[in-house]
Image (spheres, helix red, strand yellow):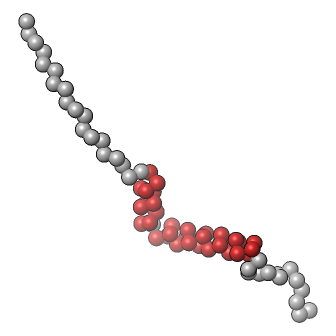
Amino acid sequence: MSTASHDVVAPAAAQRSDGVWLAAWRRFKADRVGLVSACVVLAFIVLVAVSALGWVAKGWQDEVGV
């Protein structure tokens, strides 16, 4: 009788990837135009928030000096 030798090989340990969002952030950091555009959009959002709180353009509807 012949005997078949079945060697059981342990699977290699899978390396954990950094993740999709980290890869996207790294690609975004390398894009200078994208970073500048994001800063402009962030500045608009801050301006909207500050205006809503009344810190900027507080009386823009009032007629002054007429």
Q: Residue at x 12, y 19 (%)?
A: 5
Q: Residue at x 7, y 6 (%)?
A: 1
- Residue 26 screen position, x and y as percent: 41, 61
| Near-viewer residue (2 or 63) | 2
In the rendered image, the vertical position of residue 38 relative to residue 2, given as above or below: below
In the rendered image, the vertical position of residue 15 relative to residue 51, given as above or below: above
Q: How many marks?
A: 0
Image quadrant holding the C terminus, namely bottom right
Q: Is residue 44 left or right of residue 51?
A: left
Q: Is residue 47 left or right of residue 57?
A: left
Q: Residue furthest right?
A: 66
Quarter of the image holding residue 57?
bottom right
Quarter of the image holding residue 14?
top left
In the rendered image, the vertical position of residue 11 relative to residue 46, given as above or below: above
Q: Residue furthest left?
A: 1
- Residue 3 screen position, x and y as percent: 10, 12
Q: Residue furthest top?
A: 1
Q: Is residue 43 left or right of residue 64?
A: left
Q: Residue furthest bottom?
A: 65
- Residue 25 screen position, x and y as percent: 45, 60
- Residue 34 screen position, x and y as percent: 51, 67
